[in-house]
Amino acid sequence: MNLRLSRVTIRRRSAEVVGSSRSFAAPVRETLALVLDENAPILDSDQDIDDVVLRLRGHLMELGHATPEPPRPAIEEAFKAARLLADIDVPTGHVQARVHLRQLAEAVNLVITELTNAGAVCGHQPECPSVENRDFQAAQVRVRHSEIGCSELCNGVLVFDDTGCLLPSGKVVDPRRPLPLVASGPKAVTS
């Protein structure tokens, strides 16, 4: 099982290095699948369970940065329950450790669900590109504001009808208009 966990970690790091369109939520969902997916292999060693618990604790800290301001009560409650489970030491005994791991995974899954419902995490499959990617305008429309001529994308970008954009950081991206055609007159004949 350690081999499989290592492959997931390597894939995650290589995707981050090359600037993939994966958001920070993609690795969280991969870890949750290791625990909650019915077809996932059973974690058969105490070390594997400890490794996944540590990974879930790290993911929980990363998710804390995605909390919208002001935080919604449902998100706060989900984080509170998940943090309480994350603070508990992994019980001794394989069965008790697996039960604790499953409870922690379900609590982190609830956090992801609440963040997705709040629009702080992309819930689309495949995931929408993040703002840092060149193809950030390929994200799906979250809300259409026809009265002002713009759409809010899943990654927080405002795209205006003239193709201009306003990034969440406040940076303005100029519209991409077609270049005007150059008028060409009759060519002079030279002898």
Image (tube, rainbow, N blue to C red):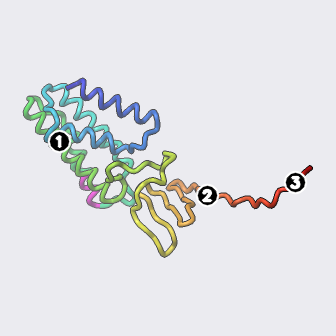
Q: Nearer the viewer, residue 56 or 92?
A: 56
Q: Is residue 102 left or right of residue 166?
A: left
Q: Residue at x 87, y 54 (%)?
A: 189
SS of the residue at dot 3?
loop
Specify the label residue 47 is tagged with. Answer: none
SS of the residue at dot 2?
loop
Q: Nearer the viewer, residue 18 or 91?
A: 18
Tell me the residue that label 1 is attached to. Answer: 37
Q: Amino acid at mark 3?
A: Val
SS of the residue at dot 1?
loop
Closest to the camera, between mark 3 and mark 1, is: 3
Estimate the x, y position of residue 180 in percent, counting from the top left: 69, 60
The relative height of residue 149 versus residue 110 in the rendered view (above or below) is below
Do callouts 3 and 1 mark residues in contact (Cβ within 8 Å)?
Answer: no
Instruction: Give the magenta range.
Output: 73-78
Q: Residue at x 54, y 59 (%)?
A: 166
Q: Please say whether residue 76 is one of the residues in the magenta stretch.
A: yes
Tell me the residue that label 3 is attached to. Answer: 189
Q: Residue furthest front?
A: 191
Could you give the CA–CA distance between mark 1 and mark 2, rounded to whole angstroms?
44 Å
The relative height of residue 115 versus residue 150 in the rendered view (above or below) is above
Estimate the x, y position of residue 144 in percent, counting from the top left: 43, 68
Closest to the camera, between mark 3 and mark 2, is: 3
Could you give the CA–CA distance between mark 3 and mark 2, rounded to whole angstroms?
42 Å
Tell me the residue that label 2 is attached to. Answer: 174
Q: Earlier in the sequence, mark 3 or mark 1?
A: 1
